[in-house]
Structures are given as structure tokens and as C-alpha cells.
């Protein structure tokens, strides 16, 4: 797919309904698409055929026109689907597999200039520009956008793409570069991804923000996690993995909110003598900065009408209201 005009960063390129949607799968099923292609989960072949056979004939014809290794319906779905996570009414996290007409025809790059998302409110898949795309340039998305796929080395990503999609990636992150007169892997990019994966494995994204009786050492853990998140976010920026920054900004915001709570208890390192005031204000302001970063990123990845973006906007508003009620370091206690 080529850009017919200049597309600005954050602009919505495309929104369309799915041609085919499979029943939800467990969200902890690693590499759903890959297992699906081998027909080893939830009777994959039978499930796909049942859903396909229930579709109108014109939709079946469009699906048959998508790229695939052979003529089986399972191959068509496995090679062209995108997966998105959502929570059921019971609060269970599941993965939904969908195939589209236009979105599924967009080619891959490990350094993509666009991103695919599912908008539950619109009931459509969307594509947004990750950077400015000049007229005539190819629009590219990342088929391995999850943490496990994106933080592998170029050799491992190429091997996975060749196995499951029948092509080897030749993007700048994967392309072999000259090193001392010899052709070799893109070591700088590989090194950044390895370091990011090592840090990711040390991160705790579930934060108990307002624990009434914090365990001993909780402040050291909090500060250590923030330091790791700073390194992780910087590496993601260098690599160009914008999608992974969303959860990192949220985690850092929650650690700052935890800091505000600990300051109130007199535990945070920069709490004042009374255990509140400037310490609580400072941490809340830092949290607000990261919530705003998350909102800025989500708006450009998903659009303002996406439920996640709207929820983050609500959190930003609440955080702004809280900050306005707290005494700042420049405001004497007891005065507005």
C-alpha cells in the first residue's frame, strides 16, 4: 500500500471492519497466529473452516484473494490475521483474531511507519501513521509488534517471518551491514533490542499504588523500577518501537503515584517532615507528566476516539484536579 499524499504522524490512514473474526482465545497463548497456522489450538482448522463457511460468498471471495501459502482457509487466516487483546464482561483478558481486506494487504517492516489497532468503539481496525510518510512511500506495519517478537535480534525475527509468513525482512533494522569490510548483522540495533529485553524481564508492570502497610524496602524497589523504566523507554525510542512505550509510561506514572502515597506516609525519600506536602505534590506532578505522555502516544497510535485513549484522558483530568488541590513546594502550608 502506497501513500497517495503526504501523511502526517498520528493521522488515521485507514479504518475498516474485519472480514473474518474468530472466537476469543486465551490471552496468555503465546504466538497465537503461529499456533493457529499449525492448527494446534482449539481445533484451529475446524474452527476457522466453520467461521469461513458461515460468511457470504462475496466475503469468501475476497478472503481467497489474500496472500497465502496454499489454498486452505487456515493458511489464508494464519498469513493475514492481526490479533488484539480485550477484556470480556467477566474481566477475562482474551485475544481476538481478525482478517481484513485492506489492512491485511499492508506489508511488514521491523521499523514500521504505521501501526494497526482495534477500536472497540468503532468496531473497526485502524491504521495510524507513526511518523510523517511522504507521498509515494510504502505504508508498512510491524507483524511482530508484541514484546516477545519485537525485542528479538534481526536473525531471529527473519527466521520467524520466513517460517510463518514465507518472506525474509529486508528493513534497515534487519539488513546486513558492512563491518570492517565484511557483511554482518545490524549489531547496534540487535544490541539495543537485547538490552531492552533484559530490562523488560526485570520490570513489574502491576503496581500496588496505595498499599496501606507497605512492605519494607518498597521505596528502594520503586526507585529501582523507575530507573529501569527510564532506560527501557529510551531504548524503545532509539529502536522506534512506539507501541511498547504505552505500557511503560503507564507503569512509570503508577510508580510516581505510589511515591505520592509513600510521601504521605513519610516513607518516600523526598517527603517533608510532616510526611506530605511538597513530596506528595512532586510525585503527583511526575505522575501527571507520564499520564500525559501516555495520552499523547495513544492519541497518535489509536486516535482520540479509542476507548484506551479516552480512559487515559479521564485519568489525566483526575490527576490535574488532584494536583491543583495539593500544596506545591512554592506554596506555604495552610494557604491556598
Image: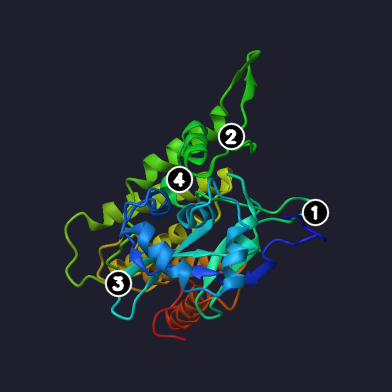
Report the residue at 33% width, 45% height from top. Answer: 201
Task: Point out residue 106 in the picture as x, y percentages from the top left corner.
Answer: 64, 55
In primary-sequence order, the first of circles 3 and 4 is 3
Q: Would residue 265 be found to the left or right of residue 174 on screen?
A: left
Depth check, front residue: 207 or 139: 139
In primary-sequence order, the first of circles 3 and 2 is 3
| 10 Å crowding of disc 4: few (<14), some (14-19), many (20+) | some
Q: Name the residue under label 1.
A: 134
Disc 3 element: loop
142 over 198 or under it: above or below: below
Q: Mark 2 points at which residue?
A: 174
Report the residue at 47% width, 69% height from top. Answer: 53
Disc 1 element: loop
Q: Label 2 near label 1: C-beta < 8 Å?
A: no
Task: Point out residue 288 in the picture as x, y percentages from the top left corner.
Answer: 48, 70
Depth check, front residue: 30 or 63: 63
Q: Label 4 near label 3: C-beta < 8 Å?
A: no
Q: Mark 3 points at which residue?
A: 92
Q: Would residue 288 be found to the left or right of residue 226 on screen?
A: right
Badge nearest the viewer, 3 or 1? 3
Task: State the CA–CA distance, disc 3 to disc 4.
Answer: 23 Å
Disc 4 element: helix
Q: Label 1 near label 3: C-beta < 8 Å?
A: no
Task: State the CA–CA distance, disc 2 to disc 4.
Answer: 13 Å
Q: Name the residue under label 4.
A: 149
Amino acid at each position: 500500500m502506497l501513500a497517495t499524499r503526504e501523511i502526517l504522524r498520528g493521522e488515521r490512514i485507514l479504518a475498516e471492519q474485519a472480514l473474518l473474526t474468530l472466537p476469543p482465545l486465551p490471552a496468555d497463548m503465546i504466538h497465537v497466529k503461529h499456533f493457529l497456522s499449525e492448527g494446534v489450538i482449539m481445533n484451529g482448522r475446524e474452527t476457522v473452516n466453520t467461521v469461513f463457511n458461515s460468511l457470504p460468498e462475496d466475503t469468501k471471495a475476497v478472503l481467497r484473494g489474500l496472500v497465502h501459502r496454499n489454498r486452505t482457509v487456515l493458511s489464508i487466516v494464519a498469513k493475514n490475521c492481526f490479533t488484539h487483546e480485550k477484556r470480556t464482561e467477566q474481566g477475562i483478558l482474551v485475544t481476538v483474531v481478525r482478517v481484513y481486506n485492506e489492512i491485511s494487504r499492508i506489508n511488514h517492516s521491523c521499523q514500521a511507519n504505521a501501526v494497526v489497532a482495534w477500536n472497540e468503539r468503532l468496531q473497526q481496525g485502524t491504521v495510524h501513521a507513526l511518523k510523517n510518510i511522504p507521498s509515494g512511500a510504502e505504508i508498512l506495519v510491524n507483524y511482530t509488534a508484541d514484546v516477545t517478537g519485537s525485542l528479538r535480534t534481526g536473525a531471529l525475527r527473519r527466521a520467524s517471518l520466513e517460517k510463518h509468513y514465507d518472506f525474509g525482512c529486508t528493513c534497515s533494522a534487519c539488513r546486513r551491514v558492512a563491518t570492517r569490510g565484511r557483511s554482518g548483522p545490524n549489531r547496534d540495533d540487535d544490541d539495543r533490542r537485547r538490552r531492552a529485553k533484559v530490562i523488560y524481564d526485570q520490570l513489574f508492570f502491576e503496581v500496588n499504588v496505595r498499599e496501606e502497610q507497605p512492605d519494607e524496602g518498597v521505596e528502594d524497589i520503586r526507585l529501582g523500577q523507575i530507573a529501569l523504566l527510564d532506560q527501557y523507554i529510551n531504548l524503545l525510542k532509539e529502536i522506534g518501537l512506539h507501541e511498547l512505550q504505552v505500557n511503560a509510561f503507564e507503569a512509570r506514572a503508577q510508580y510516581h503515584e505510589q511515591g505520592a502515597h509513600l510521601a504521605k506516609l513519610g516513607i518516600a525519600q523526598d517527603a517533608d517532615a510532616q510526611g506530605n506536602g511538597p513530596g506528595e505534590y512532586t510525585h503527583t506532578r511526575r505522575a501527571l507528566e507520564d499520564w500525559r505522555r501516555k495520552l499523547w502516544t495513544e492519541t497518535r497510535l489509536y486516535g482520540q476516539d479509542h476507548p484506551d485513549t479516552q480512559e487515559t484522558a479521564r485519568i489525566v483530568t483526575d490527576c490535574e484536579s488532584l494536583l491543583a488541590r495539593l500544596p506545591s513546594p512554592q506554596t506555604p502550608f495552610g494557604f491556598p
